[in-house]
Image (tube, coloured by chain):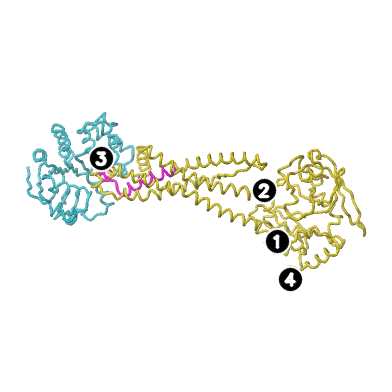
Amino acid sequence: MTFKDTVGLALRNLKQAKLRTALTTLGVSIGIASLAGMVSLGVGLQDQVVGRFLQSGVFDSVTVMAPGLLGAPGALIASGGRDGLRGLRGRGQPSENGTPAPKLDDAGLKKISSLENVREVYPIFRIPVEMTLGDFSRPMTVTGVPMSSKSEGAFQTFSYGRFFSSESDRACLLSLNIAKQITEKDPGSLVGKTATLAYAASRGLQPERVNLECRIAGIVERDPGALPIPGAPGGSVIIPLGFAKSIDAEAVTGVESFLRDPSQPKSYNAVTVKVNQAKHTQEVEDRIKQMGYTSFSINDALRGAKNAFIFLDILLSLVGSIALAVSSLGIVNTMVMSILERTREIGIMKAIGASDEHIRRIFLIEASVIGILGGFVGVVIGWTVGRVINFGANVYIQTQGGTPGTLFSLPLWLVGSSIAFSVVVSLIAGSYPAQRASRLDPIQALRHD
Amino acid sequence: MPALVETQNLKKHYQMGDTVVRALDGVSINVEQKEFVALIGTSGSGKSTLLNLIAGLDHPTSGSLRIDGIDIAGMSAEDLSRHRRQNVGIIFQSFNLISTMTALDNVTLSMMFAGVESGSREKRAAELLESTGLAGRLRHRPSQLSGGEQQRVAISRALANRPRLLLADEPTGNLDSRTSHEIMEVLKGLNEREGKSIILVTHDANLASQYARRTIVLMDGAVQTESQK
C-alpha cells in the first residue's frame, strides 16, 4: 500500500465525518493559537525591550578606557583640581600581567580596529563647554559622534531638523529637553540658529577662553549623550566627530590635559568600539581586555534580560500548552469514537488483506492531517488575535503618549514550529487510537454492528 | 504436489465463562486444487470457525493447517494478512461491503492493500464487475444495489488479487432462492472455467449437493461424514 493510497483513505475517512473532523481540528487550532499567541507575545515583548536597546547602539558597542581610568565613567570628565589629580594617579596601575599598560593613542586604536568583528573605533570626546544662545547660557558637555551613528536609534527620532551633513560640519544637535529649556514655546524655531560654544584652550601656560559658533542642525527626542556613559553633567551638545577632534586638540578637558607631554602622541581618555553584530560584543570585549585595556559594555545587562525572557517564554508556552493538551485529548476522543463507528469497516479491511500496520498508518495519517490543518488554522487565529490586541494596545499606548510597537511578533520560525508541533502532538494523541484500531480482532470486528 | 488446504487434528477451543467451548475438536480434511467443497452442518457445528481459520482470520488452538504445504497455524499477524491478500478471497453472508464506498472502490480497496498501482487496479476492478454482470453499476454505493448485486461486488472483490482459493461463508443466506441460484452459478462458473478452488460453508444441504462436488458434514466441531458426488 503506497503512502498516497494511505493518505487518500485517511482523507476519505475524515470527509465521512466532516463536522467531527472540523470540531476536532478547531480544538487543535485553538490550542495551537494559544500556544503560538503566548510565544509570540514573549517574542514580541523581547523584541520591544531588547530590540530597542540593540537599535539604540548600546549593545553593539564596547567602551574602552585608558588603563588609568578604571571603569569610572565620572573620571572621563574629570572634575579638575588637586583631588582629581590625586584620584587619577592613585588609580594608575599597570595591567594585570605586569607589562606596562598600553596607551590609548592612535596606534592603540589601530590595533583595536584590526580585531575581528570590529566595525569601527572612534575616540570619545567629551568637552566641557558653555553654550550661549541669546539669553540662554549654561555649562554643557560637547560629545562627538561619527557620521555612522546616523543609523542608530537615538538619531531615528528627530523632533526637528536633521543629522549633520559631514564630519567637519560646524553644526550641533540638541536634545528636545534642552531645546525646551531655551524656548518652551517653539523649540523647532531653534533649527538653523547659531549657538556659541565657549571652551578653555591650553595655549601656552594659561587657559584661554575660545568661542566657537555652530549651527543648530536638529533636535532629537532623547538625549543620545546620556546613553553610552551615564553621569555626564548637564545636557549634551552633539557635534560631528571631526569637529570635536579639532576642539579636543587644544581644549582643556581635564587634569590630564595639563599633565600631557606635548612631545608624546596624543592619547585618548576613552574610545568607543563598534562591533559588527551585538552577539560578538562579548568576544571583542574579552580581546580588548587581553590587550590590557579597561573596557565595559552593557552586554551583561542584555544577557540578564535575555535570560529573563527565556524564562518568560517558557512560562507563556506552558500556559499556552494547557489549551493544546486539552485539544489533544479531543483528538484521542474523536479517534476512539471513530474506531467504534468504523469497527466493522476495519474488520472488512483486515479480512480483505489489510495488515495491522496498514490500519495503524491510516489512523496516524488521519491524526496528522488534523494536526496540519489545526496547525495552519491555529497560526492564522493566533496571528489575527495578536494583530487585534496589538492594534488595541497601540491605540491605548498612543493615547498615553507612548510609542506604538509590536507586542505580538510572529516570526516565520514560530509559524513553522507551531505547525510542526501541532503535527507531533496530534501524532502522539493519535498513536493510542491507531494502535487500538490496528489490534482489532477481525472476526469480532466483522460481527460488530 | 501438496493439497491446497490440508488440516490435521485442527482444534479451536475458547473460554466462555467457566466452560471451554470446543468449536473445532480435531478436524483433518484436505481440499485439492480446483475443488468445489461444501462444508455443511448446523449452527455451532464449527463450519464457520474452520473457514475463518483457513482464511487466516483466527489462530487455531492446536493442530496444523497447511496452505500449499505451508503451515499457517503459528503465523504472525503480519504473515497472516499476507496470506489473506495473496491466497484467499472471502465472500460473506452479509456481503461486508464498505457502505460509503462505490462498488468500484470496494473492489479496488483489496488491491490497494496488495500494492497494485492505481491505474491497473481500477481497470481490473471494472473488468471484474463487468464480468459478474455489474456493468453500469460501477459508481453505485451498496445501498443503491440489490442483495444479489452486492454479493456480485463482493465476489469481484474476492477475485481481485487473483487468489486460487475462494472461501464463501453462507453467501446466499441473505438472498432469495432465485438470486441464490444466480450467485451459485457465478461461483460454479469460477470453479469450472477459471479453476478456482471453492470452499462453501452452508447449512443448506440441497444447495451443497447441487453445486459442490464433495460435501463435508461437520457436527460438534468434528467431521461427521464426507460424501463425493
Point out the tag, 4 or 1, that comes first from the N-terminus. 4
Q: Which mark is residue A288?
A: 1
Image position, residue A142 (x, y; %): 81, 51
Task: Identify the residue at horizontal 7%, vertical 44% (top origin).
Answer: B228
Q: Nearer the viewer, residue B70 or A138?
A: A138
Q: Which chain is cyan?
A: B
Q: Amino acid at mark 1?
A: Ile
Image position, residue B88 (x, y; %): 22, 45
Q: Nearer the viewer, residue B157 or A62?
A: A62
Residue occupied by mark 2: A55
Q: Amino acid at mark 4?
A: Gly
Determine the CA span between mark 4 and mark 1: 16 Å
What is the magenta range?
A347-372
Q: Amino acid at mark 2?
A: Gln
Q: Chain of mark 4?
A: A
**Disc 1 versus disc 2: nearer the observer:** 2
Determine the CA span between mark 1 and mark 3: 79 Å
Residue occupied by mark 4: A98
In this image, A320 relative to B134: left or right?
right
Name the main secondary structure of what is drawn in magenta.
helix
Asked if residue A55 is among those painted magenta in the image, a careful observer would answer: no
Residue occupied by mark 3: B160
**Disc 1 versus disc 3: nearer the observer:** 1
Q: Secondary structure at mark 4?
A: loop
Q: Quadrant of the N terminus of chain A?
A: top left
Q: Which chain is yellow?
A: A
